[in-house]
Amino acid sequence: EFPHGVRMLCWDTAGNLQWAGDSFVTDMTGSVVARRVVFDPAGNGYVLGRRAPTPPELGSDLVLLSWAPTGAFRFARTISGDPNDSDTGVDFATDAAGNVCLVGILNGGGTAGYGQMLVAKVDPNDNLLWTRTFSGTAGLHGRGLGLDASGNVFVCANSGLLNEIVTYKLD
């Protein structure tokens, strides 16, 4: 179970609580830190963040959680680099088909251990469609993600110690 799970709450436009759904699942351990929430066209909700396992010296993983429009918990997916690294989800969006595109940081990987940028796409049924990783000379940290009307993925990033701003387009 998540000792410190994530709870998704839904209020209607008048401020009345409609439902509250928890992320407690039995096949994962550790505490989850939520960063953002988005919804797909079908009304499924997604939370992106990181999961710090127990014991904490094992590092952390990027985690994507999903709830149905009714508040029922759908799935939890982790994506990680090296098991001892501190990986985290940073930003994400959904496309017209309900796929989730996300950007995260795989800390400890990449050039000289400065970190890699991870970009991934997951379908609405929790199937991992693809992942891409990018490194810079002093690490590369994804900071934002957007999708255009055609579903192309745009990511902005900082290049580690050089403080460069980099933009990627993935089709």
Image: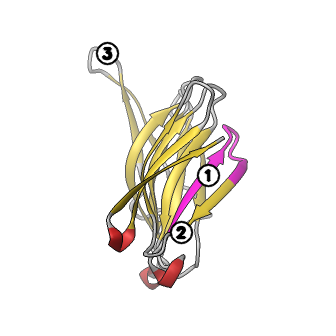
Residue type, mark 3 in image? Thr
Residue closer to the observer: 42 or 96: 96
Residue at the far left: name it.
15
* Position of residue 84 measured from the top left corner of the image (x, y, whole percent): 52, 82
Residue 14 x %, y %: 27, 14
Kindly identify which residue carries mark 3. 13
Q: Position of residue 41 (x, y in %)?
A: 57, 23
Query: Quarter of the image holding residue 164?
Result: bottom left
Residue 10 % position (x, y) = 39, 29
Q: Earlier in the sequence, mark 3 or mark 2?
A: 3
Quarter of the view holding residue 161: bottom left
In which quadrant is the C terminus drawn?
Answer: top right
Asked whether the viewer can see residue 26, the reply is: no
> Under tag 3, what secondary structure?
loop
Q: Amino acid at mark 2?
A: Ser
SS class, disc 2: loop
Q: Is residue 77 visible?
A: yes
**Which residue in the protein does label 1 denote?**
120
Contact flag, marks 2 and 1 (Cβ < 8 Å): no
Q: Which residue is mark 2?
A: 135
Q: Tell me the crowding category of disc 3: few under 14, some 14 to 19, or many 20 or more residues within 10 angstroms, Cα based.
A: few
